[in-house]
């Protein structure tokens, strides 16, 4: 039997969402589960050029097997006009086979995002990522207000999931509250996956 893992699946253009993914993975590991970081290739507006199997740098590209076999999922994207980025949507649109067989039903999931402006669509982007997860029958986890970072943040952070205000130039680093909220989501996903495994096993 394979070791259970939380899949931290994201798309990142300038690195902010990737850093959030690493902090969520850290939270998963702090809770005692393996975190598997995966990304998706960019899509082209001109043609459907085939991306290399292995990216030049960073996390490996996700496969449907990564998603099928995960014990839980953290899904992240920068915002694009209040919605998830096209590469992540493209990947999710290819998961119909998993939906038909119910492979993701009952697994915990959460979402995260980064924006260049403070009110640049963080919450609507998080909600856009939740919709396919609900169709897959996943158990959606947000962040409760018992997480002090939600009350103290001056940057990102919502009850729908962690968020980050990267600034117009994309150079604003995650602050202490944003890091804490990312790690909290990772821990919640890991603890929930562990409890579900114990109740079913």
Image (tube, grey):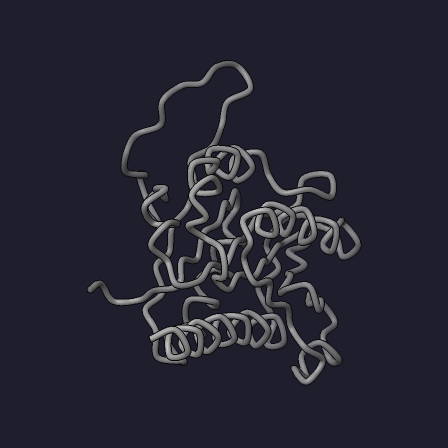
Percent position (x, y) of residue 142?
A: 64, 68
The quarter of the picture where residue 141 lies is bottom right
- Residue at position x 52%, y 40% in the image: 88
The image shows a total of numbered marks equal to: 0
The quarter of the picture where residue 56 lies is top left
Percent position (x, y) of residue 8?
A: 43, 57
Q: Nearer the viewer, residue 5 or 119?
A: 5
- Determine whether 200 is above or below 171 in the image: below
Q: Residue furthest top?
A: 46
- Determine whether 147 is above or below 164 in the image: below
- Determine whether 168 is above or below 73 in the image: above
- Determine whether 47 is above or below 163 in the image: above
17 to the left or right of 2: right
- Residue at position x 48%, y 42% in the image: 99
168 to the left or right of 178: right
- Residue at position x 67%, y 79% in the image: 149
Q: Residue furthest right?
A: 119
- Residue at position x 74%, y 71% in the image: 154
Locate the N terminus by quadrant.
bottom left
Q: Residue furthest left?
A: 1
164 to the left or right of 201: right
Percent position (x, y) of residue 43?
A: 49, 27
Locate the C terminus by quadrant.
bottom left
10 to the left or right of 168: left
Q: Nearer the viewer, residue 171 or 134?
A: 134
Q: Nearer the viewer, residue 104 or 40?
A: 104
Percent position (x, y) of residue 45?
A: 55, 19
């Amino acid at each position: 039997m394979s070791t259970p893992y939380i899949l931290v699946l994201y798309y990142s253009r300038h690195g902010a969402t990737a850093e959030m993914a690493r902090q969520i993975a850290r939270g998963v590991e702090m809770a005692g589960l393996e975190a598997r970081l995966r990304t998706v290739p960019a899509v082209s507006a001109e043609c459907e050029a085939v991306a290399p199997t292995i990216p030049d740098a960073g996390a490996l590209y996700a496969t449907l097997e990564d998603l099928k076999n995960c014990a839980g999922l953290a899904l992240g994207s920068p915002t694009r006009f209040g919605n998830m980025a096209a590469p992540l949507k493209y990947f999710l649109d290819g998961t119909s086979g998993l939906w038909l067989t119910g492979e993701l039903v009952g697994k915990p999931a959460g979402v995260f995002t980064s924006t260049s402006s403070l009110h640049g669509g963080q919450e609507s982007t998080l909600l856009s990522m939740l919709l396919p997860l609900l169709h897959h029958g996943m158990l959606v986890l947000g962040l409760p207000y018992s997480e002090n970072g939600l009350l103290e943040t001056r940057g990102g952070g919502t009850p729908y999931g962690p968020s980050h205000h990267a600034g117009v130039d994309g150079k604003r680093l995650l602050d202490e509250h944003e890091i804490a909220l990312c790690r909290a989501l990772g821990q919640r996903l890991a603890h929930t996956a562990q409890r579900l495994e114990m109740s079913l096993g």
